[in-house]
Amino acid sequence: MFWRGRDLKGFIMINVEPGAEKAVHDALERIRGIREVVPVYGERDFIAIADVESISDLNRAVLSIRKINGVSYTETILGMELKF
């Protein structure tokens, strides 16, 4: 299920410097709250999927990602809950 209680899901799209892919991938997997790191084709190099309890937790994860050597760009999208 996409939403569990009050958990939030964030999708962090990441670009890295050429040659830094392996080191960045390994560092991403060690960040608290990051559930999965997906290498992708296209304008971005990775999408990190975060499962966190609060927007503050997501903010901490994004700030940690931005500190990784080799990361040149991030863009974060917050998942939403559909109510029909």
Image (spheres, helix red, strand yellow):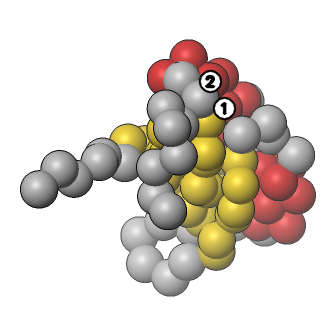
Q: Name the residue under label 2.
A: 57
Badge 2 amino acid: Asp
Closer to the camera: disc 2 or disc 1? 2
Residue 75: image tag: none
Q: Position of residue 16 (x, y in %)?
A: 64, 56
Q: Classify 10 Å Cα crowding around label 1: few (below 14), some (14-19), many (20 and above).
A: many
Q: Mark 1 points at which residue?
A: 61
Can residue 63 be seen here? no
- Measured along the vertical axis of the image, is residue 4 above or below residue 55? below
Can residue 84 be seen here? yes
Secondary structure under tag 2 reads: helix
Q: Which residue is drawn at 56% across and 17% down?
A: 56
Q: Position of residue 60 (x, y in %)?
A: 65, 22
Q: Residue at x 61, y 36 (%)?
A: 52
Q: Do the residues labelled 2 and 1 touch (CB within 8 Å)?
A: yes
Quarter-of-image position of residue 57: top right
- Quadrant of the frame with the C terminus: bottom left
Q: Is residue 3 left or right of residue 47?
A: left
Secondary structure under tag 1 reads: helix
Q: Classify 10 Å Cα crowding around label 2: few (below 14), some (14-19), many (20 and above).
A: some
Badge 1 amino acid: Ala
- Measured along the vertical axis of the image, is residue 49 above or below residue 69? below
Observer-nearest residue: 55 or 60? 55
Exactly how many numbered labels are in the figure? Answer: 2
